[in-house]
Image (spheres, rainbow, N blue to C red):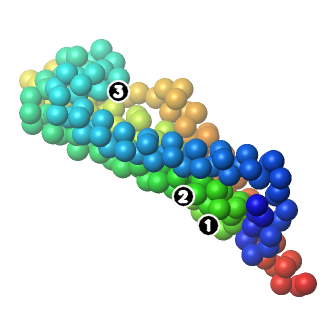
Amino acid sequence: MQARLSGTTIGLTGPAATKLVRLSRAMEWMSTIGIVLIVALIGAVFLVPSWTRNLLLTKLGEIGTRLPLDAGNQALAAVIITVPVAVMLWGLLNVRALFAEFARGQVFTTAAATHLQRFGIAVLAQGLLGPVTATALALALSLSNPPGQRLLVLTFSSNDYVSVIVGGVLVAVAAVMREAARLADENASFV
């Protein structure tokens, strides 16, 4: 396999190339399976009330057990959860495309950098959306409670923090990849 550095071919051959192709194809499949499972499971979560309650417990802790969960609130929770799920799916679609690029030998390309950057943005956004989603769920689902029993929940976990940091690292690495591809194209044009 010859890996491409934008318009320039670099020598990635032998066992390293074979391993990269094998790993990339496996990860492309894993990403595809993840996308399908997330869509199916999130759909199921909002059709089965006990699963919706479990999701609320995961997002809100014990407070999730005290929130009313009728059909209207279940639909409202589904709408709120759709935002971070859509961001996650967008990120997974981009990481899937990144692995497809790698499997074709397109390692250091502008397209690969773009997919990595988008995945990084999705990871970073997940860290930021975690606290916002929990707050929105608690507010929306307790709105019908009598005054004094409405909830405002503010959460920020170490997972949210790590998502922001890892997302930032991926975005920075993607910028470095894009610059390397640009310089390689520039250098190739001189030859």
Task: Give the position of the C terminus as an image quadrant.
Answer: bottom right
**Which residue is label 3 attached to?**
59
Q: Amino acid at mark 2?
A: Ala
Q: Secondary structure at mark 3?
A: helix
Q: Are marks 2 and 1 in contact (CB under 8 Å)?
A: yes
Please report the residue visible at 43 percent of the width from the left and 42 percent of the height from the top. 33
Mark closer to the chain start, 2 or 1 = 2
Crowd class of label 1 (few under 14; some 14 to 19; many from 20; radius 10 Å): some
Q: CA distance from mark 1 to mark 3?
A: 35 Å
Relative to residue 18, is residue 141 depicted above or below? above
Please report the residue visible at 66 percent of the width from the left and 57 percent of the height from the top. 102
Q: Amino acid at mark 3?
A: Lys
**Which residue is label 2 attached to?**
97
The circle on residue 20 is none
**Residue 113 rendering spot, x and y as whole percentages:** 65, 61
Relative to residue 37, is residue 62 depicted above or below? above
Q: Quadrant of residue 105?
A: bottom right
**Residue 128 rendering spot, x and y as whole percentages:** 46, 41
Task: Give the position of the N terminus as an image quadrant.
Answer: bottom right
Q: Quadrant of residue 132?
A: top left
Q: Are marks 1 and 3 in contact (CB under 8 Å)?
A: no
The circle on residue 111 is 1
Please report the residue visible at 54 percent of the width from the left and 58 percent of the height from the top. 97
